[in-house]
Image (spheres, coloured by chain):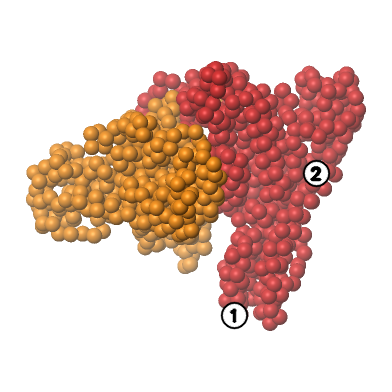
Chain colours: A orange, B red
Amino acid sequence: MAQEKKFVESITDMEVDFPQWYTDVVKKADLTDYSSLKGCMIIRPYGYAIWELIQKNLDERFKATGHENVYMPMFIPEGLLQKEKDHVEGFAPEVAWVTHGGEKKLEERICVRPTSETLFCEHYANIIQSYRDLPKLYNQWCSVVRWEKTTRPFLRTMEFLWQEGHTAHATAEEAQEETIRMLNVYADFCREVLAIPVIKGEKTAKERFAGAKATYTIESLMHDGKSLQSGTSHNFGDGFARAFGIQYTDKDNQLQYVHQTSWGFTTRMIGAIIMVHGDNSGLVLPPAVAPTQVVIIPIAQHKEGVLEKANKLAGRLSSICRVKLDDTDKSAGWKFSEYEMKGVPLRLEIGPKDMEKNQAVLARRDTGEKIIVSLNELETKVEQLLREIQANLLKKAEERRDSKTYTAKDMDEFERILNETPGFIKAMWCGDQACEDAIKERTAATSRCIPFEQEEISDTCICCGKKAKHMVYWGRAY
Amino acid sequence: MAQEKKFVESITDMEVDFPQWYTDVVKKADLTDYSSLKGCMIIRPYGYAIWELIQKNLDERFKATGHENVYMPMFIPEGLLQKEKDHVEGFAPEVAWVTHGGEKKLEERICVRPTSETLFCEHYANIIQSYRDLPKLYNQWCSVVRWEKTTRPFLRTMEFLWQEGHTAHATAEEAQEETIRMLNVYADFCREVLAIPVIKGEKTAKERFAGAKATYTIESLMHDGKSLQSGTSHNFGDGFARAFGIQYTDKDNQLQYVHQTSWGFTTRMIGAIIMVHGDNSGLVLPPAVAPTQVVIIPIAQHKEGVLEKANKLAGRLSSICRVKLDDTDKSAGWKFSEYEMKGVPLRLEIGPKDMEKNQAVLARRDTGEKIIVSLNELETKVEQLLREIQANLLKKAEERRDSKTYTAKDMDEFERILNETPGFIKAMWCGDQACEDAIKERTAATSRCIPFEQEEISDTCICCGKKAKHMVYWGRAY
């Protein structure tokens, strides 16, 4: 047990220093490594396997809603980026510029995509002619680059992996339906797969995506009371279509502009998994995105028949879940804490005494509970426990989120909550950006969203006291 | 039938102008579009769906051989690229250089990865300490950039998608085994999935990857007699390990350098599928990589019950293959030629007369043959036909490849074959680069590989007449 302690002690307590706890977990769970270029991360096999599970599940949801995958170039010529005015203003300050190809200076600079609206628009202008060509429901999985100054693994890096959906529709109504449909796909995915509850709502004008008519968001709450924007879906109206000349002939032979949307989900959600479910023993993974759902650790594995039995159980479980047998020569205690750190949902211990009794010991990562199970009902029990763990993680996250959601009626209360018990704050707002700016200036909290589910906390704006228009979720954010 | 003809006539005959035929097929089958940046291509849904099928199958083969996926940054600082001398000389002339991040000039230029050996090496130096850490069997799926002057969709583009495997081993023997193992994975994949037969062999020193000790290749032959390098696997020995200081402590507590490999497979193989199997009606897809394996075309679909029946058949077939029902209002003839162009392996026609007889008509894309099948045995027959088509495409490709493989004993014969009946030429070589250079200078043919299966065509070098060391496959290549 000495080894186990040492392994665990080497991460910081989340109550003592949450950012350091986060960094420790990312490193000790073998999720990422640093590269020599500051701000870029290496996603290691264990971290990438989580992303593959996210991808697979989301991709199925996209395809089930009629979307097709494509691949656009990673380069955008400067002239193309500039075609939509708001969009270029939003992104130009943070792009990487390529100026030379081989030995030769380029005539026009090109940037590495920070997002691909301009590329999709150019393509849509080429391929959309008639109402028969609509809707176009495209998605791509790729990496994008934003030249960030301060970076943290998963949460904010110069390059990150994501998917970006880009769609074109005949009418404004269809575009709006699509925007909300995909926000719901994200929210359902977070809830059902990542076990993360989210608040759905609209961003204020100030927080809107560069070039969008409306931006919708899902917001989640981390262990430390900070919120994380977890997925966004934008309705562009016909703004990009006008800038890029994307027109179609309708059934009455009239030229019309298309209406567009885009929506994105990124590797930063691996950071959310860590910060929503993790604890002082490390990562805690929801079974649905755990690369290993059950780890088998043989006890006294040098004794006759133990490894053979462990192998047999691994074979049995491999048909119902992602199972791994660790038969290395490390001590069992060391292995226990290693897989706790990696957040493996279930540990199965099998030793000579268990074998005598035709049983195994299952240990839950989420509760620490140990359950003795007859080998006759192993599969049933493992399936049941994985379901229970998935449900329990969501329940715990909901309870924590709810217990950290407050209402404030004046700025003093607002500020006191933020400083003493950080979390979401529900408060009324007049709709004026001046108030939003003033609140941010005073408290470092930003408007997270105008939630779809409105409540009337009071009838005046928390900042200026004028008539309130919306209830807003506020918080300090990653 | 007028419409059908028009659709077909719009592609060039491959016998008249093969490059134009290729360009026509790529465009008419909706595989790619051009982007405003010359040399970059957009992979459209139909083309990308082929790549997804390739990825899925290859990825399973990589995982089955113990490999794990990771993600490395897309940027390489200039200093890191320069660490291995041969490697930088090979790649520096063709990379894209990023010189500015946002508004700021960078202190050190960074390039967009042309390949990621240097990044993997830096990471391996960080994470490999002991023999227990070996082997490391990593792979990544990503895009890479090479600043090419002349480009063609799939075959040669500035940016392309690929996978790159990078492994580190304790011994030279293990690294060599891995190099050959992965070459075999590629060869088996080409044969079993793409229905493309390949020649396996070693590249000459001149054609080796920059920094490799040995490069192995699989070479395939296109319809026009040109060859295409279809996958490469490199043994680096300990060259990169010495340049990057990748050392481990062995069981005797001695510091040792690791031995490394890398291997890659790219989207250019979609070009190979087109050029190996295609014909004058367009693309011909092997069922294993066909996004749609069976297209159902209702005949007289306005007649009662036809669409209903077609839908029912689509439902039945969806459990055994990738099926699509085209119920748009285009004419049946138009649809026929459209799906021929797209290379869909099987077409199913169902109309009122078929319904009366409880039958459907199946048309094979590879042979044009029409088969009447009872609806009672539809699933069995479709499965059987898809298997037959897959096998037939491989057989035809093998026969064509064999019929275009020649032997030459002197340079006149060599040149005459190349000019009159282009294909692979087997000829003896002394092993001297001067002869390789002279042959290329005179004929524009390059050494494709020194095949594992050697034959003794004569005992002297075809170029200099000195004692021959190897039988070599030569050819003009893409």
Please tell me whether mark 2 sits on a helix, a strand or a loop. Answer: helix
Camera-nearest residue between B200 and B109: B200
Camera-nearest residue between B194 and A85: B194
Q: Position of residue A348 (x, y in %)?
A: 44, 47
The residue under the point 78% across, 30% down is B450
Q: Position of residue A115 (x, y in %)?
A: 42, 42
Q: The residue marked by circle 1 belongs to what chain?
A: B
In which quadrant of the rendered image does the N terminus of chain A lie? top left
The residue under the point 67% across, 23% down is B213
Please tell me whether mark 1 sits on a helix, a strand or a loop. Answer: loop
Q: Position of residue A293 (x, y in %)?
A: 44, 48
The residue under the point 59% across, 65% down is B319
Question: Which residue is identified by label 1?
Answer: B305
- Identify whether A394 is placed above or below B462: below
Camera-nearest residue between B462 and A102: B462
- Please indicate, yes or no, whether residue A229 appears anywhere in the rendered image: no
Asked if the residue at tag 1 contacts the one at tag 2, i.e. Cβ–Cβ closer than 8 Å, the answer is no
Question: Which residue is identified by label 2?
Answer: B401
Q: Looking at the image, is mark 2 or mark 1 earlier in the sequence? A: 1
- Identify whether B68 is placed above or below A464: above
Q: Quadrant of residue B239?
A: top right
How many angstroms separate mark 2 from mark 1 (CA)? 47 Å
- Identified by mark 2, the residue type is Arg
- Identify whether B243 is placed above or below A413: above
- Identified by mark 1, the residue type is Gly
- Identify whether B15 is placed above or below B121: below
Q: The residue marked by circle 2 belongs to what chain?
A: B
Alpha-carbon neighbours of circle 2 within 10 Å: few (<14), some, or many (≥20)?
A: many
Label placed on residue A150:
none
The residue under the point 18% across, 55% down is A471
